[in-house]
Amino acid sequence: MSLVFSLDLNLPRSAEEAPGDEIVLPGTSNRTVILIHGLTGSPNEMRHLAFTLNKAGYGVHCPRLANHGKPLHILKHSTWEDFYAPLRDLFLRLTGTGERVFVAGLSMSALFVLLLAEEFGEKLAGGICLSPTLFFDGWSVPWYHRLLPLASYTPLKYNLYFKESDPYGIKNPAIRAMVDRHYRKATLSDMGDVSKFGYPYFPVSLIHQLARLIRRVRPLLDRVRAPILLIHPRDDDTASVRNSQIILDRISSPIKELVILTDSYHIITADNEREKVAADMQAFLDRL
């Protein structure tokens, strides 16, 4: 990751929102899974999981996080509450139909799974945390990342960005090369197809929001009793396995499991072991 400063003078102010790219697939039973992509990502990260689980009979809802797909000057002013509220509403709408609802989230969105579990208890049939992120301690995180909380309490937080760089959370060389071609040519004024690849630039203001979310979630972990599956790559470039281990040790769920992957980086839903991730998720859900 490289740090970029901008006064936003060249950011497009009237860019249209990307076309809707939510994935909604009807199932053949009363079991539905909500799949939540990661911060600055897109539902495309969850596409393989969505279609695999749907083939097994599950209904699937994969929404786009609030303000994702909109211009960066809108996204960077978003709060974690802005992201969570529509997910909570979707969960309540689906459970209100009598469906058994499961929720899986990637990276930051794994924390939304834990929030739903703590708030709604047995209404959540089961949760899956994929590469959950309580802190950034992966092997590719730059040293100066530790200093960013200082900037988060100044106006600078709205003018600082990380430009994503190799390996982009992906170990698979072919997929990583495809992402690299897109991200290398991206600029703050032309970020390309964010609905497919996510944002090449990560606003520091959103790191502040993630820190706020973590402070909200960590004290609640011992009140989580829903069945929880954690899946984490051993070589996570963004957040080490310690993130999942802390969650596993703290939650009070009678049913809780940790699967460690050996051939993936952070974005496990689209990397080398995506089929194993889907299979492990399905096996866990089928048992509940």
Image (cartoon, rainbow, N blue to C red):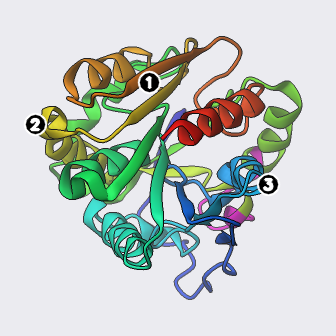
Q: Is there CB contact under 8 Å for labels 2 and 1?
A: no
Looking at the picture, which amino acid does disc 3 mark?
Lys
Quadrant in which residue 116 is drawn: bottom left
Dot 3: few (<14), some (14–19), or many (≥20) neighbours within 10 Å?
Answer: few
x%, y% of residue 172?
Answer: 80, 26
Which residue, given by chain and number where applicable, does mark 2 sit on?
A: 219
Residue at 79% over, 54% down: 55
Helix, strand or loop status at disc 3: helix
Pick the residue in front: 28 or 148: 28
Helix, strand or loop status at disc 2: helix
x%, y% of residue 151?
Answer: 23, 43
Which residue, given by chain and number where applicable, does mark 3 sit on?
A: 55
State yes or no: residue 81 in magenta.
no
Q: Which residues are magenta?
A: 184-195
Report the side of 56 relative to 139 (left or right). Answer: right
Quadrant in which residue 247 is drawn: top left
Which residue, given by chain and number where applicable, does mark 1 sit on?
A: 239
> Magenta stretch mostly in which secondary structure?
loop
The quarter of the image holding the N terminus is: top right
Mark 3 vs mark 1, foreground winner is 3
Pick the residue in front: 2 or 103: 103
